[in-house]
Amino acid sequence: MTSEPVAVIMLRIESIEEDIRRLEKKTEPVTRLIFTLREQRSPLVDLLDYRYFQQLPWDRCLELLHVSRGTFKSWRVRLIEKAARMLGFDPE
């Protein structure tokens, strides 16, 4: 069994971190909208659910989140939970 060089592992970690930063940047306007709706006690907030991502085909999620296939497969749960927390939902 061959182990990967540390440099390759570090590149993968950097790629994952970049994907998460991209996700944070893309969800920022949504986060602001939800915050505004919550302040106004809008019933729309009840309709917004992080599970929306879980109900989509993975290829569609991949496209929406703009992440690589390998990263998405490895980190999809973490990305969904992070998006849920950013949107104010408890993923548990």
Image (cartoon, helix red, strand yellow):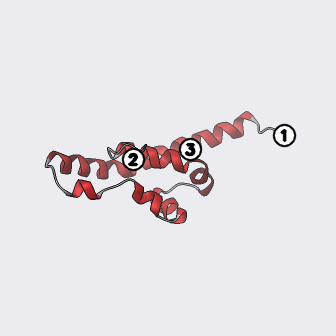
Please tell me which residue is depicted at 19% across the width and 51% down the height of the picture.
37
The local crowd at label 1, few if under 14, some if 14 to 19, many if 20 or more residues have their Cα within 10 Å, is few
**Quarter holding residue 39:** top left
**Left of 3 or right of it: where is 40?**
left
Q: Position of residue 73 (x, y in %)?
A: 60, 53
The local crowd at label 3, few if under 14, some if 14 to 19, many if 20 or more residues have their Cα within 10 Å, is many
Of the residues shown, which amino acid type is indicated by label 2?
A: Ala
Which numbered disc covers residue 16? 3
Of the residues shown, which amino acid type is indicated by label 3?
A: Ile
Q: Position of residue 34 (x, y in %)?
A: 25, 50
Q: Position of residue 82 (x, y in %)?
A: 44, 43
Please tell me which residue is depicted at 16% across the width and 54% down the height of the picture.
42
Please tell me which residue is depicted at 84% across the width and 40% down the height of the picture.
2
Viewer-closest of 91 and 37: 91
Q: How far apart are marks 3 and 1 (CA)?
A: 22 Å
Of the residues shown, which amino acid type is indicated by label 1?
A: Thr
SS for dot 2 = helix
Viewer-closest of 15 and 53: 53
SS for dot 3 = helix
* Residue named by callout 1: 2
Q: Quadrant of the C terminus?
A: top left
Q: Distance between the residues labelled 3 and 2?
A: 18 Å
SS for dot 1 = loop
User: Mark 2 or mark 1, which has the lower sequence index?
Assistant: 1
Note whether 60 is above or below 33 in the view shown. below
For the residues bearing labels 3 and 1, Cβ distance under 8 angstroms: no
The local crowd at label 2, few if under 14, some if 14 to 19, many if 20 or more residues have their Cα within 10 Å, is some
Q: Distance between the residues labelled 2 and 1?
A: 37 Å
Viewer-closest of 20 and 55: 55
**Left of 6 or right of it: where is 92?**
left
